[in-house]
Structure formats: C-alpha cells, structure tokens
Amino acid sequence: MQKFTGKRAQTELVRCLPSVSKLFNKDETVLGFYQDRIFHIFRDRRTMLILLGMPVLQIILFGFAITTELNHSRVAVLDPSKDAVTTRITERIDENRYFSVVKELSSASDIETVFRHDEADIVVAFTPDFDANLSTGEAGIQLVVDATDPNTGNMMAGYVQGIVGQALQSGTQSSPIVQTHLLFNPQMKSAYNFVPGVMGLILMLICAMMTSISIVREKETGTMEVLLVSPIRPIFIILAKAVPYLVLSCVNLATILLLSVYVLHVPVEGSLWTLSFLSLLLIAVALSLGLLISCVVQNQVAAMIVSGMGLMMPVMLLSGMIFPIESMPAVLQWISNIIPARWYIQAVKKVMIEGLGMAAVWHEALILSGMAALLIGLSLKKFKERLE
C-alpha cells in the first residue's frame, strides 16, 4: 500500500474526491429508491386493506361461520295427551339452547304442512295416553326430521333423544320407543345438500368473474374508448357483453342438472320451470354484479381478486352451502341476507328436494329480482358516468 506525503498526498486526495462523492450519491439514490417503495405501499390504501383487512375478515368468518353445532333449531310438537310427562319433555326441549319450540300441532296431518311451509326443522310427535302407556312399554315418540342436510338432521334427532332420556330419569321402569323418520332424504345422501349449493356457487362465480374480466379487458386494450364514442347506447353495450355469458351459464346449469340427476341420483321433485326461473334470476344478479365490478376496477387482476376471492368465501361460508345459517351469530346471519346465493340455495332446496312450487319460493324470487334490478341500475349509472 502506497503512502503519499506533502503535495503528492493533496493531489491524490483531490483526484479521489469525485469517486467518493459518486459512491455516496449512489448509496443515497439506492436508499431513496427503497424508501420510496416502502412509502408507496403505505400510500396505496387498497393494498393496505388487503394486507391488513383480509386476515381480520378471514379469522372472523372462519371462526364464527364454521361451526357444526345446532342453534335454535325450530321444533313443532304433536302432543294429543298433554300429560305431565309429555309436558316435562317439551319444556326440557324448549329450555335447551339448541332448540326452540315454535308450534304445537293438532293432528298428524299438520306434520307435512309445517315442513312444506318451512315452519319447523323437526317434529316431536307423542303417542296418545303417553304417561299411562309408559309403564307398559307401549308409549312411543316419533321424530320427523328435515333431512335435506343429513348431518344436521342426524344431530337434531340425536340431541332430542338425549333430552328425552334425561327428562325420564325419574325412576321410570320402561323407556318410550323412539322412532326417527327422515323427511325428503331417507337415504341420507350428502348430495341432496351440496348440489344446490354447488349450483349457486358455480353460477355466481362464472357469471361475475367472466363478465367483469371481459369489460376490463376492453379498458386495458384501449377498445373501450371506441365503444364509448360510438352512437351505441350503454344498455346495448352491456347486453352485448352479458348475453354470451348468459348462454354459457344456461349450458352450465343444464350440465349440472343432468349430472345431478343421472350421476349423483338427486331428483328434481318440483317444477323444472320454477327451478330454471330461479336460476335465471341468480344469473341476472351475478352478471349485473360482474358489470358493476368492471366499472369500479381498472385491470383484470383486480377484477379476478374482487369477483373471485371476494365472492367465493362469502358464498361458501355465509350462504348455507356448507354450514347452517341458523348456527351463526346474529351479525353474520344479517350479513348473509345480502348474499344472493343464500336465497337461491334456499329456494332450490325447496323446489328440487322438497318438491314445492312457486308459491313456496316467491319470497326468495322477489329478493333475487330486487337484487338484480338494483345491481343493473347501479351498473348503468356507473357506465353512463364513464361515458360522460
């Protein structure tokens, strides 16, 4: 290593100063670049919302919505004798946190009616002169369960049998004969429960995702400006984008129904026309939702995240597709009311599994129609704003 003294040292120092200065400037540039990237993340509110808000939303939904417990299942009671023992059993059922006695039936013919009108989840029917026949072993209890969801139906029947056993632990010599009758799904096939849910999930995701991506793609390629300056009215532009996916969704619906009936052996007990009408309503809701998403986001990636991830989790967890809505907290039950698939799945189970007609699903059809009209109106408004 050379050592310089005197004028030679001063000369070398002056010569090296520019290089040292560039080195420090380079470090400052790199440091400034990283600082700018860090602050850019914090300035992007959407990114921060996804990074910090999504984990909170997921832990709340998964923590409260995913539950296999029963909660306030509706019980109807047929008690011809109304003696002390049947009254005690009924009170024990009503006091249990899993059940609520909501109706007393006057005859056996009312049992099917309460299920047809969706007024009860389980019916507890006592035989006449229950108390008098209990000591002789002739007393019986029949549990009629809505087995559209086989897991929930089994749990309700098991819980009621346990309550009956606890209520009769008072020195009785004989126990009543408890029979369980599974309504709508005597084979206990799980397909009866998940097929309507899968139908709602597929129609929601396919329609919303594809429609939102198709319009955003026009924005990214620059062809949207050509459409905006053309004399074509916004409603016709929207219809031109929605009709192809409407046709594809109808093909998907037909495929799902054929596979459900001939492969999974899930019958369509009700009217096929009613089922098709409900499906078209959900398709209209999903298409209009996709159009609204396309008016808000600016690129295909954002459209995929909002319409795919943003819809899949609420539909799977809050629509009753997998977990019963009655078992969720009141807040999540209220939020589930704005999930279109919740009303569609509820209506499809009534038509497809229970064999009910339009008179039993008019409430769900009216809600889906209102959602479709609202979303179409919002989509047109947003589209006109961009046109101006």
Image (cartoon, helix red, strand yellow):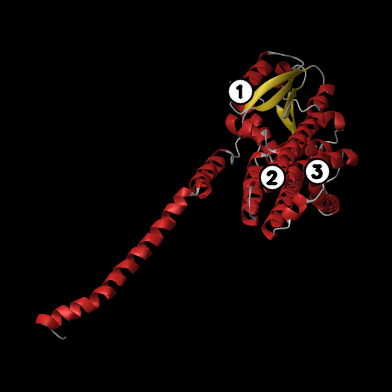
- If you read the primary sequence from the N terminus, does the residue marked by circle 2 or circle 3 appear first? 3
Image-based side of 163 in relation to 125, left or right: left
Query: What is the three-letter code of the residue carrying label 2?
Result: Arg
Residue 301 visible in the snapshot: yes
Q: Nearer the viewer, residue 67 or 103?
A: 67
Query: What is the three-letter code of the residue carrying label 3?
Result: Ile
Of tags 1 and 2, the one toward the viewer is: 2
* Quadrant into which the N terminus falls: bottom left
Q: Which residue is mark 2?
A: 386
Q: Residues within 10 Å of mark 1 (few under 14, many from 20)?
A: some
* Quadrant into which the C terminus falls: top right
Query: What is the three-letter code of the residue carrying label 1?
Result: Ala
Image-based side of 263 in relation to 303, left or right: right
Q: Is residue 95 above or below residue 334?
A: above
Q: Nearer the viewer, residue 266 or 274?
A: 274
Q: Does dot 3 land on a helix, a strand or a loop?
A: helix
Residue 168 visible in the snapshot: no
Query: Can you tell which quarter of the image residue 15 is in?
Result: bottom left
Q: Which residue is mark 1?
A: 167
Q: Does dot 1 land on a helix, a strand or a loop?
A: helix
Q: Which residue is mark 3?
A: 235
Query: Can you tell which quarter of the image residue 121 is in?
Result: top right
